[in-house]
Amino acid sequence: MTSARRGWLVAVRVGAGVALVAAVMFAAGPACDTPDPSEITEIDAPSFAQFEGQNLSATQAGVSRLLELRCGSLDCHGQVGRALRIYGEFGLRFVDGDADNQPGSGATTPTEYEANYQSVIGLQPEYMTLVYEQIYPPEALLLIRKPLQLERHKGGAVFVSGDDAYTCITSWLESGGDAGGSTDYDACGRATQQ
Amino acid sequence: MTKIALLLLPMAAVAAACDADPVHTAAVNALGPEVAGIPKGEYHRAGQPCVTCHGGEGPASKVFSMGGTVFYGPANNSAPIGVGNATVVLEDDSQSQFQVITNCVGNFYIQPGDWPGHPEFPVLVTVQGQPEGTNLQVSMQSHIGRDGSCADCHQYPTQLNYFQTPGLVHLSPTDDPTFAGTDPNCPVDPVPPGFGGGP
């Protein structure tokens, strides 16, 4: 091999090495980007009052009560590590000042209702907005897809399309937007008795 | 020979480093060793989550689909003590029912062949028993979502876990310090070690 050809090969190898390092740095750059603290995601979400269920009869319930009973057991979504984290009377308790409630004792607290609401609407904030504005159907949300088993759900099928639990949650999700409306508290109440 | 040894050495090191499920291993290790005087078997580790080791991932060879321990009271004012001959009634999502009786330390377990194809979660559970001539019955307020071990949720309450456990599975709402167990011939003390009941 001539010395000129050898020099050419060395130059190619060095160039390839430099290009590889540059490509890795370019790829790693976005991953090391720091979050923009001024950037926020605004959520158009259904009513907190209807989620909590205020001034209801004995046979009615809010959406939170249904989620507490169907989803919030301590071995499922009543765990601090869950993205959809549900607090409540029969499951995980929110450590909240003097309200040192244990699972199974003490009614669900206002702080726990608020935490449940934040968890539900914050799970998929962009999709929640689109569903609330009735651009997407409720089935776009994991909140509905998982319990219907449209996606893998370790807890299995929690409700089926059209039953009281489904009606309870979807009526709440669709209570805003152009159509307006209200949560079907009677369906929620029946679903909590099943 | 040296070359073979050199080849095997890194392979052994890699095999040792490869823990198939470190979460499971950590959960097993967290339960600690066996306690002296209580042999492995139906009476051991009362109040611990049975299915952690008996769930098919080992280290126990016998597989349980569900298992737990029934205690007399909540153990707020006295050491927890297991209740024998209590009936644990389970009803799963397919409305199939199954009953199992606790042994003299309060332990019970269900093997997959005992209730074939079940449980289908969620499961409702009621416990009935007659310790000291009483007739006690208690039902869980919520359902079991998917965990076969009672003790994953039902733990001895402490300052660290009170917000995420309803306490031990117990028949009576109050403790009875005079209750000494349901079987005087029980081969193991029904007051389990740990949980305020000894070392």
Image (tube, coloured by chain):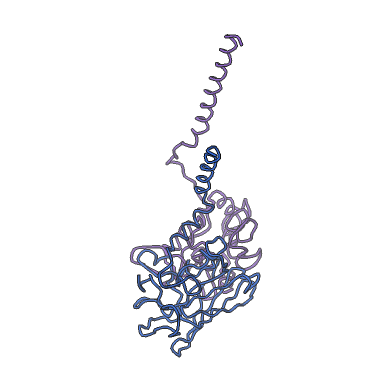
Chain colours: A purple, B blue
User: Between A122 and B154, which is closer to the camera in this rendering?
Assistant: B154
Q: Taking B75 as reference, is A76 above or below it?
A: above
Residue drawn at point x = 58 percent, y = 16 percent: A9
Residue visible at 51% across and 42% down?
B9
Q: Nearer the viewer, residue B115 or B146?
A: B115
Would residue A63 be seen by someone viewing this image from the given angle? no
Q: Position of residue A160 (x, y in %)?
A: 65, 64
- Looking at the figure, which quarter contains the C terminus of chain B? bottom left
B79 relative to B60 in the view: left or right: left
Q: Quadrant of the N terminus of chain B?
A: top right
- Image location (x, y in percent) of residue A155: 58, 62
Q: Residue furthest front?
A: B1
Q: Quadrant of residue B119?
A: bottom right
Q: At 58% across and 55% down in the image, what residue appears?
A: A142
Q: Is residue A93 left or right of residue A126?
A: left
Which percent across, then down, holds residue A10?
55, 16
| Total residue callouts | 0
* In the depicted structure, whether residue A109 falls above or below residue A137: below
Whole-percent x, y for residue A129 in the image: 55, 51
Near-viewer residue (B103 or B7): B7
* Residue A31 in view, yes or no: yes
Q: Is residue A4 above or below residue B82?
A: above
